[in-house]
Image: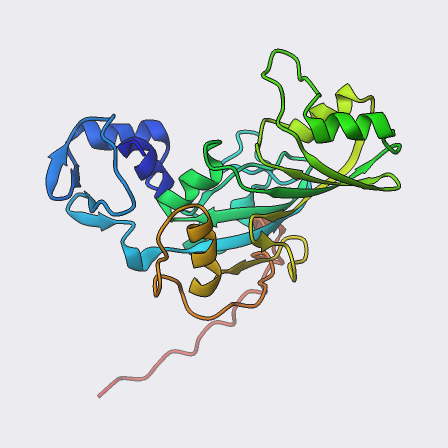
Amino acid sequence: MRINKYLAACGLGSRRAVEEIVLAGRVKVDGVRVENLSLQVTDDSEVEVDDKRVLSSEGVRVVLLHKPVNVMTTRDDPEGRATIYHLVPPSFRWLVYAGRLDYASRGLVILTDDGELLYRLTHPRWDHPKRYVVELDAALSSPDLARIREGRIELPDELPLKPVAVEQRGRTVLLELREGRNRQIRRMMDVLGRTVLDLCRVGVGQWTLDGLNSGQWRELAPAEIDPMRVALGLPPKGSAGRGPTAPPIDPQPSREPRASREARPPREPRAPRGPRY
């Protein structure tokens, strides 16, 4: 992975911001100062910024979040809409999300500070199953299901899609994708003349939404992280996690705007104090 992408994956800022950090000579890799943005690093590289270790093996965290509808998968929204980072505590807001869900979709979003894991979860070279439950306005025909299974749906101005495993139950379809193009499922259904009424990502690889209600999150234990790393061709981290499996946590409560808080009654004036000896 290129050094700028690695640092961005560690949550040090946007790609442009971390490029400035590198070009300013503030980064060392394996003890050597670097200013080359194309330098490749691995999970075993020792990366420092301002002489402080970045993404040490003790720092690996993975959080599973059940994103509700009408929440943006982004760090900041210029229109002021709620983002996934409003649902987690401040200590998690520097974690990086692995794959987006659009504003109208819901389901599993992964947040992590594991740069190599993030790269392999998002790069098309390492395909892994992503499972969705989709409700449509009308059931698909048998020929349409065959087109999905055989990868015979063409999106405008794009390469052919990979075959998709699909199972239909009335107007609900269960899809298993091994690629992740922008709004892929909605655009596939548009081609087939169907409208998506609800779209939920229920699993990515071995991780699922099980036990998470809308808006809830939980942090994974090492025993839950290592199998996914191994499945993606990475070595296990062993004791790198953060303790036993945590229960689901509800989203962070938002503070009310100052103007909307109840006015407090004025305090009684204090009685004058006597001399202090």
Please give left or right for residue 277 compared with residue 203 in the image: left
The single residue placed furthest to the bottom in the displayed view is 277
Tell me what residue is drawn at x 45 percent, y 32 percent.
Answer: 125
Q: How is the image coloured?
A: rainbow
Q: Point out the image quarter for the N terminus.
A: top left
Q: Position of residue 202 (x, y in %)?
A: 66, 48
Tell me what residue is drawn at x 46 percent, y 50 percent.
Answer: 231
Above or below: residue 149 compared with residue 52: above
Tell me what residue is drawn at x 36 percent, y 43 percent.
Answer: 116
Tell me what residue is drawn at x 63 percent, y 53 percent.
Answer: 215
Q: Residue 186 lies in what quarter of the image? A: top right
Q: Position of residue 260 (x, y in %)?
A: 62, 50
The single residue placed furthest to the left in the displayed view is 32
Above or below: residue 36 compared with residue 73: above
Q: Position of residue 261 (x, y in %)?
A: 61, 55
Q: Point out the image quarter for the C terminus.
A: bottom left
Q: Residue 69 lies in what quarter of the image? A: top right
Please give left or right for residue 99 compared with residue 41 in the image: right
| Along the line of sight, the residue nearer the viewer: 187 or 260 | 187
Q: Position of residue 29 (x, y in %)?
A: 17, 40
Above or below: residue 227 compared with residue 13: below
Whether residue 221 appears in this view of the structure is: no
Q: How many numbered marks are there?
A: 0
Whether residue 265 appears in this view of the structure is: yes
